[in-house]
Amino acid sequence: MKDSLIIHRRFQGPANSGNGGYVCGRLASYIQGPATVRLKSPPRLETELHVHRNATGLTLLGEMTARVDQAAQAAAEHVVIGWELEREGRKHHTGTALFDAAGICIAKARATWLEVPSPA
């Protein structure tokens, strides 16, 4: 199951970032039972943050860097591929690429996903 979270500007804390207490509370709501949430960077405002749940818990998108060389056409066919680059405990480093119908890579990204285990 995939969920998303947007921190709206009215919940701004320090300049251009979400209020830490509010954001931690929102993230903790995805975990059943007691939760500890640590923010390692300022949470962005008005940006979709992805939360992925699986059988062992949930996965939060920690960071993503992307390069878009050409905009994807809405009605055109595209191919998306993804792969795991590395795993460090609960951190999953992944790569993603987007290709147009001619097989030309038009965008690529690197992301870090953080696995949050479900309580026993």
Image (cartoon, grey):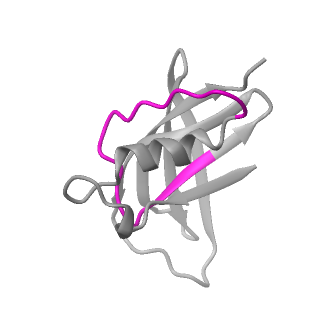
Q: Quadrant of the C terminus?
A: top right
Left or right of 103? Residue 77 is: right
Rendered view: 41 above or below 97: above
Residue drawn at x 54%, y 69% as measured from the top left: 102
Residue drawn at x 35%, y 62% as measured from the top left: 45
Farthest bottom residue?
75
Rendered view: 39 above or below 88: below
Residue 11, x across and y down, in percent: 38, 61
Q: Quadrant of residue 83?
A: top right
Residue 85, x across and y down, in percent: 49, 28
Residue 107, x across and y down, in percent: 42, 59
Q: Quadrant of residue 63?
A: top left
Of 29 and 114, nearer the camera is: 29
The image shows a total of numbered marks equal to 0
Instruction: Please state the extent of the stretch shown in magenta in the rendering.
Output: 32-51
Left or right of 107? Residue 14 is: left
Q: Quadrant of residue 56?
A: top right
Of 119 and 56, nearer the camera is: 119
